[in-house]
Image (cartoon, rainbow, N blue to C red):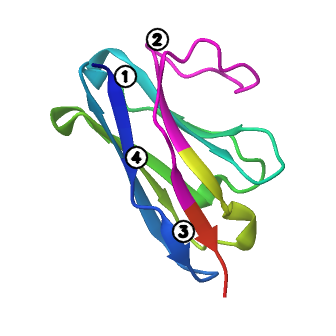
Amino acid sequence: QFQFVESGGGLVRPGGFLKLSCKASGFSVDYYSLAWFRQAPGKEREGVSCIDQRSLARNYVPGKWGRYTISRDNGANTAYLEIDDLTPEDTAVYYCAALPAQGCPSTMDSTSRFTYWGQGTQVTVSQ
């Protein structure tokens, strides 16, 4: 069974740090670009970051590229997302997804090419 399981979410104060994990099972992430998306209450899902098969990363949140660091460990079949200096605007359910392509897309306007999705992990930034 193909599966992604996210973890690492939780309640954190503004200015804090989180590291999210996404472990795949049933398939090898070696042949995929891996991405993180998020969906805030009442908003559409948006792309946050993507890392391709060569571990080249691309961020998609306008103006906030430096706060998100995506990485991957193919040996552990896992992708990670570090978020620094969290703000309430980061509150969302974070999802990971796999794209059967060598490179990451230039935009995340369409998610139809992403084949595997996790169930999400909730991140809440609040005092």
Q: Tell me: 25 left or right of 14.
A: left
Who is closer to the viewer here, 117 or 98? Answer: 117
Q: Dot 3, crowdedness within 10 Å: few (<14), some or many (≥20)? A: some
Q: Which type of secondary structure does the marked residue at label 1 adopt?
A: loop
Q: Residue at the location (70% across, 57% down)?
A: 64
Sequence-first disc among 3 and 1: 1
Q: Tell me: 30 left or right of 64.
A: left
Sequence-first disc among 3 and 4: 4
Residue 84: numbered disc: 3
Which stretch did the figure color magenta?
95-122
| Mark 1 and mark 4: Cα distance apart in space | 20 Å
Quadrant where the C terminus sits is bottom right
Q: Residue at the location (36% across, 41% down)?
A: 5
Q: Which type of secondary structure does the marked residue at label 2 adopt?
A: loop
| Mark 4 and mark 2: Cα distance apart in space | 21 Å
Give, as a three-letter code, the residue at label 1: Gln
In percent of width and height, residue 114 lies at: 54, 18
Q: Tell me: 122 left or right of 28.
A: right
| Mark 3 and mark 4: Cα distance apart in space | 18 Å
Give, as a three-letter code, the residue at label 3: Asp
Sequence-first disc among 1 and 4: 4
Q: Is residue 117 magenta?
A: yes
Give, as a three-letter code, the residue at label 2: Ala
Q: Is residue 40 above or below residue 87?
A: above
Name the residue beneath numbered marker 2: 101
In percent of width and height, residue 72 lies at: 33, 39
Name the residue beneath numbered marker 4: 6
Q: Which type of secondary structure does the marked residue at label 3 adopt?
A: loop
Sequence-first disc among 2 and 1: 1
Who is closer to the viewer here, 7 or 89? Answer: 7
